[in-house]
Amino acid sequence: MNTAIALLLAALTWYPAPDWKDEPDRVASPHAKKGGTIRFNGAQAPKSLNGYVDTNTYTMMTFALMYENLLTTDTDTLDFAPGLARYWAVSDDGEEFVFVLDDRAKWSDGVPITADDVKWTFDTVMDPKNDTGSWKMMLGKFESPEILDVRTVRFRKKPGSEKDWRDLQNVGFFYILPKHAFESQDFNKLDLVDAPVCGAYRISRIAEQVETEFTRTDNWWRRDLPSSVGVCNFDRLVMRYYVDNENAFEALKKKTIDVYPVYTARIMGGETHGEKFDRNWIVKRRVKNHNPVGYQGFAMNMRKPPFDDVRVRKAMAMLVDRETMNRTMMFGEYFLLKSYYTDLYDDEHPCTNPEFSYDVEGAKALLAEAGWKKNAKGILEKDGREFRFTFLSRATSEDKFLSLFNHALEQCGIKMNIARKDFAGWMRDMDGFNFEMTWASWGGTVFRNPEITWLSSEADRKGSNNVTGFKSAEVDELIRAEKGMMKMGDRAEAYRKIDALVAEQVPYVLLWNIAETRLLYWNKFGMPDAVLGKYSNEDCIFGYWWYDEDKAGELVEAVSGHKCLPDVPLRVDYDVEMAK
């Protein structure tokens, strides 16, 4: 490093603070033991295990176990903390970001992690030929990083780029990959089996469309740090794939998988009975913590008729009988959504977004106002086009809801066809916006970024999260303004304004959600008293749980002797457990 650069770096303010020290994770148990295997419901097989190419929940859940970021966050306070970078600095004008890699950081094959890996990963993600979707939008505000020395790298904002409070987050939280292992491969089709990793696990085996096995690395570079005590305890993780939740639930009962996150109220409320459940061989848990609430709904493609008309979209919302679905099909477990940011509202900030109750006559009136009239066949028609559309489905579990929806559509003279795709096929169609209506769900995030989902320019970029094609100059302006808001309260107010404008245009028929994580698992695991992390759902199980040999032995004896195991509390409240 030359003298001029050394002087420049000396003038920066460096983080973390001099008195910062690595400490044990507040949630992780010091009594956790290493060993054993956990088999998990990985839902439908992903299109890729490369988290840059496929950003579905379970792909990212395992990708993060293999590859790390320059920075991480404190699991309790959410403050930034060292990751692969031991130190970092931000220039006073917020235009430059410098990271110094931890000299202990190595790939699992023993090769040191260097600034060259950081630069290669960035450049490869930004390469137009690579299908890296929303990552390009996140990193596209920065120039290609500059290598200052073997372990120091500097990022600069592109000229004219707006200041964004997420800038450090964006450059600090992309996953660093090994250049020496991947530079000669097609990035869209990386061979990840036994590839070098910097995280706690590597992929050891892939059975296409069936399962993926991950094995804990013996030489994880963070293994002996205080923050790694009690985490990443299993020797092996197995993600098994199922066409739908019903198949996965049957697999749980047959011991083919060990853990089943419940996303179907009927299963949790009506099918968790019988000897396995009554004798506590399979444990039921409902965990309440601070995990942000996401949203789900029928996404409508606003780029083309008939869903380019807001009156039609409002009519669709009136034809989904959410109250009846929740009451009769889901044991009344859910609250009905009317916001894309539910947890931003309280008594002081009530949500005033429009609510759409089931109203067939009201829907008919809106459709008539939009110019749709019944033809001689009893089908709505406008400008010579009959009102027919295809609902892109990826699970048979959707059928009962679509049946009730279809009944309402038929009353109005609308014909719906259902096209069933597996998850990979569904993702391909979604990436290309090749759909008319589909069921889409999005998890909540602690650090919100409305740009990814609602910015107008994202509506035209294939593979973006703006799947509906939503465009609004007013929302674009709020997104631009929000980037410069350093106070969380100011950003929350901006998000509420964005939420109101989006809800007014009805890009989704919002459905329902639940403010807890529901789990079923065979009673052979140890776990922290809080069960999950403060802001986590099932994505933290691989990090915090462990295989308990004593419990596993007791389970075998109980099953063979048809005996009961001790009761386990159904409900867990994170705050209550952590206050003990």
Image (cartoon, helix red, strand yellow):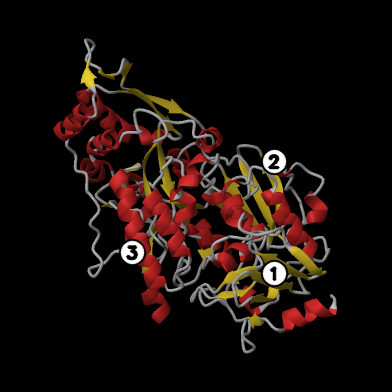
Residue type of the residue flagged with mark 1: Leu
The location of residue 125, given as percent across then percent down, is 68, 50
| Of the pair 228 and 338, the residue shown nearer to us | 338
Instruction: Identify the residue at image location x=26%, y=32%.
Output: 404
Q: CA distance from mark 2 to mark 3?
A: 38 Å
Secondary element under disc 2, as helix, strand or loop, is loop
The location of residue 116, given as percent across then percent down, is 79, 61
Tally the marks: 3
Residue type of the residue flagged with mark 3: Leu
Which residue does the numbered mark 1 point to in the structure image? Answer: 84
Label located before the other in sequence (2 or 3): 2
| Residue 492, placed above or below residue 428 | below
Instruction: Identify the residue at image location x=56%, y=36%.
Output: 424
Which residue does the numbered mark 2 point to in the structure image? Answer: 129
- Number of the label disc, if any, that sits on residue 305: none
Q: Quadrant of residue 256?
A: top right
| Of the pair 163 and 14, the residue shown nearer to us | 163
Label 1 packing within 10 angstroms: few (<14), some (14-19), many (20+)? many
The location of residue 418, given as percent across then percent down, is 39, 26
The location of residue 284, given as percent across then percent down, is 39, 57
For this view, does 92 lie left or right of residue 193?
left
Q: Nearer the viewer, mark 3 or mark 1?
A: 3
